[in-house]
Image (spheres, grey):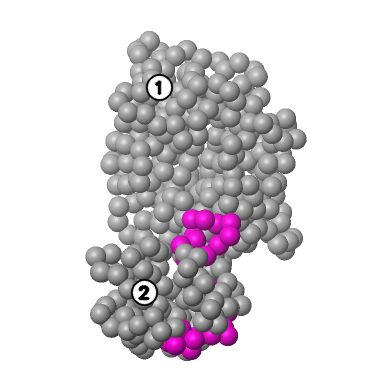
Amino acid sequence: MNSEDIAKIQGAIREEGLDGWLFCNFRHRDRLSDELLERPPGLSNSRFWFYAVPASGEPEGLVHAVETDHLQGLPGTKKTYVSREHLLRRLKVWGGKRWGVHASETISALSYLDAGTYGMLAGAGLRLCSAEGLIQRFKGRLDQMGIAAHERAAGGLYRIVETVWDFVRSSYDQKKTIYEGDLRQIMEDGFLRHGLVRDHPPLAAAGSHSANPHYDFEGPGAPLAEGDLIQLDLWAKEKTGPGIYADISWVGFYGKKPEPPLEKIFADLAEAREGVLRFIEDSLASGRALSGAGVDQECRALLIAGGYEGALKHRTGHGIDTECHGCGVNLDSVEFADPRPLLEGSCFSVEPGIYLVDRGLRTEVNVIIRGGRPLVSGPGREKQGRQFKLLHC
């Protein structure tokens, strides 16, 4: 964290109309504060530290007298405290101003500030606001370097899908028994080959297992059978550099010709995905305010109109950055409703899913807002890189 980073933070504060951004931690409970301020994870954190970045001017740090190294290297002045009474006197200096803090009523993944500390700060006169918008502006948007890293990761994932499906087709033609674990291993090998890393093994779900969006298994998994749906979901980022994730899902049919009802379900699903992309583009072009929750509501309306209301299990998408489920805007109105706007540089998944009793289908692409437009990442950016029909053998 240097003066350029502080300037970027202060720009985000002014854009959000706040007086400052207040970081704090105790026992490393707030991993986001540690990450954003680049605090070493090995430091003892048995006492509170606070770091207040104002919209303009010099940051101020506050640390306990027995842990004075916690804010070492950060710009600004540092003060110490010894007792709780002493701490409260120090905090009151920041009273009367609107501070962004890591608390959110709806976006739980960004809410680290416990109720007791929230009450202590409010009692000291600080006016507390959610920092969810600040976090998005500072961490949840990609610059040119991040976009390039994301595109490279996406290219690797698309090539891995091709490799997996070549194996499926060949095995089917040879009447060779294959397992879910075989597909997962091909994806894992592909990550290594393309210099990618992931935070969890990819998803390979066959038959009724595809109805579980977070299906997992140990060992070889289930064998593929004639007529099975195959759901692939894979995500990874480069080992080196900024390391921005890509995250895609494809659906296949283990057989020569999917039955027409199944083809229709997938066609409806793909049309909902495309409808979301058109909705985003039209909204941004017309200057209409557009939130992540609003996009999710549009997608749900499209699928409900098609008769799939009872088959919806999850939101439409999530933010993507150095984490697969990142800090930026989520397309979510039902789980962790996200009121934040889609901003230039926002990167997120669009992944509607239809889940029936015995099968599930999810198609997923990644979108970056560039030049005021939603651009799908990966090869064949406009349409070639998107799935419009079920893969089959």
- The residue that label 2 is drawn on is 48
In percent of the image, x 72 and y 36: which residue is there? 304
In percent of the image, x 49 and y 86: which residue is there? 92
Q: Is residue 284 above or below residue 264?
A: below
| Image quarter hosting the N terminus | bottom left
Whether 128 is among the magenta residues is no
Q: Amino acid at mark 1?
A: Val
In percent of the image, x 36 and y 42: which residue is there? 200
Could you tell me which secondary element the residue under label 1 belongs to?
helix
- The residue that label 1 is drawn on is 168
Q: Which mark is drawn over residue 56? A: none
Mark 2 vs mark 1, CA separation in Å: 55 Å
Question: How many callouts does the rendering have?
Answer: 2
Whether 100 is among the magenta residues is yes
- Disc 1 packing (10 Å; few <14; some 14–19; many ≥20): many
Q: Nearer the viewer, residue 294 or 160?
A: 294
Q: Amino acid at mark 2?
A: Phe
